[in-house]
Amino acid sequence: MNNIDNHLFEGMFDSKPTTRQIVEKLALFNPSLMDNDRQFCYFFDQIALNNGYKEFELPPYWSIGRAIYNYKKDNNIKADESAPKKSSLVNDVKINNPLVCVYQFNINRPSIKQIIEKIAEYDDYTLSNDRKLVELFDTIALNNGYSKDSLPKYWNIIRAAFDYKKDSKRDNKC
């Protein structure tokens, strides 16, 4: 996936497109991408970067996922029954990162929630940056029994982090 020509999507728009415009373009280009948020986000980023966005301006994955949801709802598109329940790794991650040793579990394939809780123990900032969150999540998951083809969807990881932050905020009020 990473070997795609960087200029493939260059100049698709006359001006810097909105998140919605990119989602619509990708939905028309390949509707099946809408059921694989990792691939969709990868192509979204390629289009955005080749049409006026800077790296630091890319919208959060949550916003892209929300735009996909709204597009599907507005166009009455249901998920394909054959859509994968898990996602395959799209971006390269550094699974040999020496800092990952603090994220070791004594169980094989910890749950999304368990990984999110472990991330929160050591790096609260990452919970607020969904791009960094999914990158770190993938690294931890791959080092703890997940395969490159069995990773949870971005939306599920980001949702688990949101739930964790909400629960933590509620617990801190008591």
Image: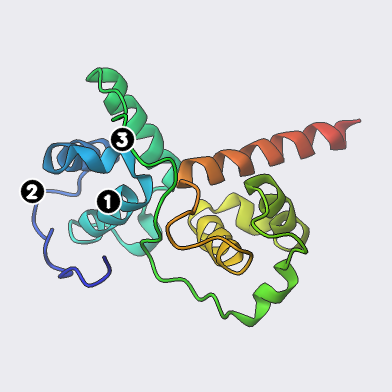
| Quadrant housing the N terminus | bottom left
Q: Residue under circle 3? A: 82
Q: Say if 77 sits above or below 42 in the image.
A: above
Q: Residue under circle 2? A: 14
On the image, the x and y values in percent for residue 53 come to: 27, 57
Q: Amino acid at mark 2?
A: Asp
Instruction: Say which element carries label 2.
Output: loop
The one of 124 and 87 positioned closer to us in this rendering: 87
Q: Residue at x 21, y 55 (%)?
A: 47
Q: Amino acid at mark 3?
A: Ser
Q: Residue at x 64, y 82 (%)?
A: 98
- Image quadrant in which you'd find residue 51: bottom left
| Quadrant housing the C terminus | top right
The answer to whether 5 appears left or right of 138 in the picture is: left
Residue 18 visible in the picture? no
On the image, the x and y values in percent for residue 6 come to: 18, 69
Instruction: Say which element carries label 1.
Output: helix
Crowd tier of the residue under label 3, counting other residues whose Cα lies within 10 Å: few below 14, some 14–19, many 20 or above: few
On the image, the x and y values in percent for residue 26 come to: 19, 43
Q: Residue under circle 1? A: 44
The one of 111 and 159 positioned closer to us in this rendering: 111
Residue 150 visible in the picture? yes
Q: Say if 3 sits above or below 27 in the image.
A: below
The one of 85 and 164 positioned closer to us in this rendering: 85
